[in-house]
Amino acid sequence: MLRAVGTQRAMCPSHFTCTRSRRCMVGAISWGVFWAAVVLESHTSGATSLWGCESQPDFPTEVVTSVGYEAASHTEEPLDYGVTDEVEWALYDDGALVISGEGRMDNCVWDYDAQAVKQPWSGHRDIITSIIVEDGVRNIGENAFRSCGGATTITIGKDVLAIGWCGLEGCGSLESIRVSEESRRFRAVDGVLFNKEMTILVHYPSSKPGKEYTVPDGVEEAWKFSFADFEEIRFPSSVTQLRSSAFEGCDNIESIELPINLEMIPSTLFWGSDNLASVTIPASVKTIEETVFLGCDALKDIYYLGTKEQWNQIEIDEDNRELFAATIHYASS
C-alpha cells in the first residue's frame, strides 16, 4: 500500500510487531506513513533514500577531525567494544554507549522469532544510560537504539544526515536529545529533536520532564510523541500534518485538541492511549484513517468544530470502532 508523503511516498509494511507486548498486533493495521519516514522506501525502484533527500546523498568524504561532546572524557578502557564496516562502538562503565568513526552505521534487524532487535550491544541494553553518536558518523541505523530503555540522553553529532526506521524507538527513559550546533540536518530545542529548519518535530523524548508541552510556532509536521509523560499538548496553527501512531501509548492524556488546520487524522494516531476520554477535531479535517483510536476504550466524547452536515462529509474509514461508539458533539447544527 502506498500513501503520499508530501512529494514523496513511503512503502507501508502489511504488519508490524511492537517491542512492548501490550502494543503488539500483527496483520490488523495497514500502516499509513510511519514515523520512520526519516528513511523512505522508494516507490519506483525499491531503493532506500534518506529523509529530506530526493535521492541517496553523496556523503562527504573529507576527514572529520572534531570529536563528540562527552565522548572526549572517556579515556578508560571500555567494558565492551566492537567494529562494523565503517564505525565502531564502545560501552563504558558509566553506562555511555559511544558510536565513533567516519562512515555509516549498519542497520539492525528485528528478530521476529525472538521478538527482539539484534544490535551489537544488545546484551548490554539494561546498563546503557546515555548514547553518544560522535562527529564523523553519518547516520543512525534502523533499530539502532531501539529498546535501550535505560538511556536518558542521546547526543547526535554534526555529521548525522539520517535516522533510520525505529532508530530511537523504545527508549522509555529518554529525557533529552542533544544535537551538535554544527549539524546540517537536525537541531534540538529544549531536548526535543527537530529538522534543521524547525518545520518538522521528529522525536519527543518519552520521559522529558514536564506535564505539558507547546509545539513551537512554524512547525508544520509532528511525528513522534509515543509514550510521552505529558498530560497536555498544544499545537500552533502552522501544524497541518501528524504521523501515524504519533501519540501511541500516551496514557496521561485524557483530552486533546487536534491542530486547527489538520486535514487528515492518520491511522493508529492514539493507539493504546488508555485514558484518552475526549478529542476535539477541527472542521478542516477531510479524512479519518483506520484504527485511529485503537485500544482507547475510555474514549467517550468527540467535539467537532463544525456542523453535523460537515461531519457527514468526512471520509471516515469503517475500521474505527472506538470512534463510532463515542458521542459526537457539533459546534452548531
Image (tube, helix red, strand yellow):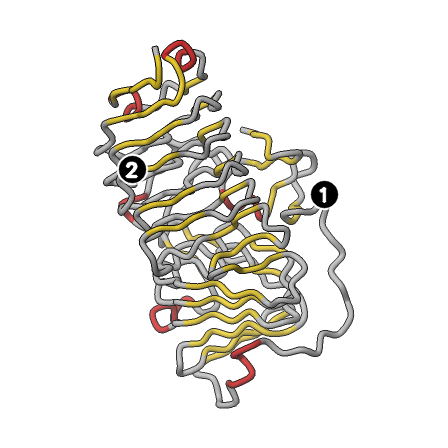
Residue 73 in the image: x percent, y percent?
A: 52, 85
Image quadrant containing the N terminus: top right
Query: Residue at the location (42% across, 53% down)?
Result: 111
> Which residue carries the number 2 mark?
255
Does residue 60 sit above or below 263 in this rendering? below
Would residue 112 appear left or right of 67 to someone viewing this image?
A: left
Q: Say which amino acid is labelled 1.
A: Glu
The disc at residue 54 is: 1
Residue 72 in the image: x percent, y percent?
A: 56, 83
Query: Which corner quadrant of the image does residue 295 belong to?
Result: top left
Residue 263 in the image: x percent, y percent?
A: 50, 26
Query: Residue at the location (27% across, 47% down)?
Result: 252
Q: Say which amino acid is labelled 2.
A: Ser
The disc at residue 271 is: none
299 or 199, which is in the foreground? 199
Secondary structure at numbered mark 1: loop
Query: Residue at the location (41% across, 66% down)?
Result: 122
In front of the other: label 1 or label 2? 2
333 or 13, which is in the foreground? 333
Label 2: how many Cα within 10 Å (few below 14, some 14–19, many 20+): some
